[in-house]
Image (cartoon, rainbow, N blue to C red):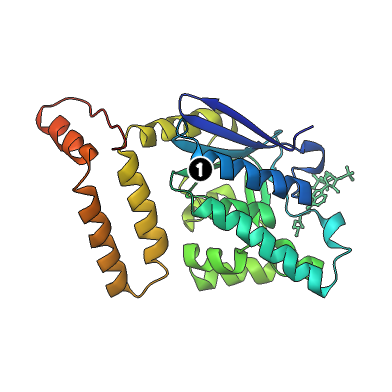
Amino acid sequence: MSFVLVEKADRIAWVTLNRPEKLNALNNEVMKELEGVFASLEQDAEVGVVVVTGAGEKAFVAGADIAELKSLDTARARVQALRGQAVFQRIEAMPKPVIAAVNGFALGGGCELALACHIRIASENARFGLPEVSLGIIPGYGGTQRLPRLVGKGVALDMILSGEMTPAADALRMGLVSRVVPQADLKSAAEKLAKTLLSRGPLALRSALAAVNEGLEMPQDQGLLYEAAQFGLLAATQDMQEGMGAFLEKRTAAFKGL
Ligand code: COA
């Protein structure tokens, strides 16, 4: 049985973490499959947007698998963290948009998985948290780095040090997610957003992702140079001619990714 299901339809790849009896907890096998799935989707020209979600009504992902974590020693724990970070880094570095459709608990590694995605939308019942300190550890798959970059140091330290869960409405207020919808509407909301992204220029999306992701790691003056370089590259594309031509001719653009 596969722990990570992939369904493709209309250029959207739906990636479902599928271990509902353990609230989709990330064991080593899940992480291995997740890495393989994203390596393949990155190369898949038929896929323009990826949506990540969790199987079942209750959880997106309730964290790394605590039963596996308990047996780690110092050396293996470090390797485990580096490996998890590398998988999520691959997701963040995807050249096409990745949407997290958070359908329930997003705790520990599940919250970190959502943080690695480019856009987070949540159902009203979703709950976010980094409860690692209550287990005597800290977030190890990027949470201490991505959360403060997303919501600011103060709010991030509140979540990381208290280990408390944050309901979807509060996550929206603090910028941890950008949209909240009723649970029954989550899939259609994710699909609608994915279709909007698919209607945009794919090379422009790739450049925008690179400019934001790379730029945030640079001083602003270097980030601005990087933005200008990406802007310049896009001026050489057929897609730019198509997008601007379509606007001036009052028609819908048909981007080819060229
Ligand atoms: N790792 C391993 N197993 C997990 C898990 C995790 N992170 N999260 C949930 N599970 C398992 C439970 O052990 C239980 O398994 P069982 O039925 O064989 O006993 C099953 O998933 C259902 O979880 P349960 O705790 O019974 O559901 P609940 O509704 O009472 O509570 C949570 C839901 C999310 C509050 C609770 O499961 C929880 O706190 N999970 C751990 C969250 C966490 O600390 N994550 C960070 C890990 S680093």
Q: How many marks?
A: 1
Q: Circle 1 sits on which residue?
A: 42
Does 157 sit above or below residue 168?
Answer: below
Does 133 sit above or below residue 229?
Answer: below
> What residue appears at the point 23 percent right and 29 percent down from the top-left corner?
253
> Does 252 sit left or right of 93 as displayed?
left
> What residue appears at the point 73 percent right and 67 percent down from the top-left corner?
79
Q: Nearer the viewer, residue 58 or 51?
A: 51
Answer whether residue 94 is visible to the viewer in this image.
yes
Amino acid on which disc 1 is placed: Glu
Does 223 sit above or below residue 117?
Answer: below
> Does 22 sit left or right of 60 as displayed?
right
Q: Quadrant of the N terminus?
A: top right
* x then y, percent, for residue 166: 62, 55
Answer whether residue 166 is visible to the viewer in this image.
no
10 Å crowding of disc 1: few (<14), some (14-19), many (20+): some
> What residue appears at the point 37 percent right and 48 percent down from the top-left corner?
206
> Does 69 sit left or right of 38 as displayed?
right
> Does 168 sit left or right of 49 as displayed?
right
* x then y, percent, for residue 4: 69, 37
> What residue appears at the point 57 percent right and 33 percent down from the top-left corner?
14
In the figure, residue 141 lies in which quadrant?
bottom right
Outermost residue on the left side: it is 248
In the figure, residue 222 lies in which quadrant?
bottom left
* x then y, percent, for residue 17: 68, 39
Q: Quadrant of the C terminus?
A: top left
* Numbered disc 1: secondary structure: helix
* x then y, percent, for residue 194: 44, 34
Instruction: Check mark 1 vs ligand 1: CB closer than 8 Å? yes or no.
Output: no
Does 225 sit above or below residue 239?
Answer: below
Q: Nearer the viewer, residue 143 or 201?
A: 201
Q: Nearer the viewer, residue 130 or 47?
A: 47
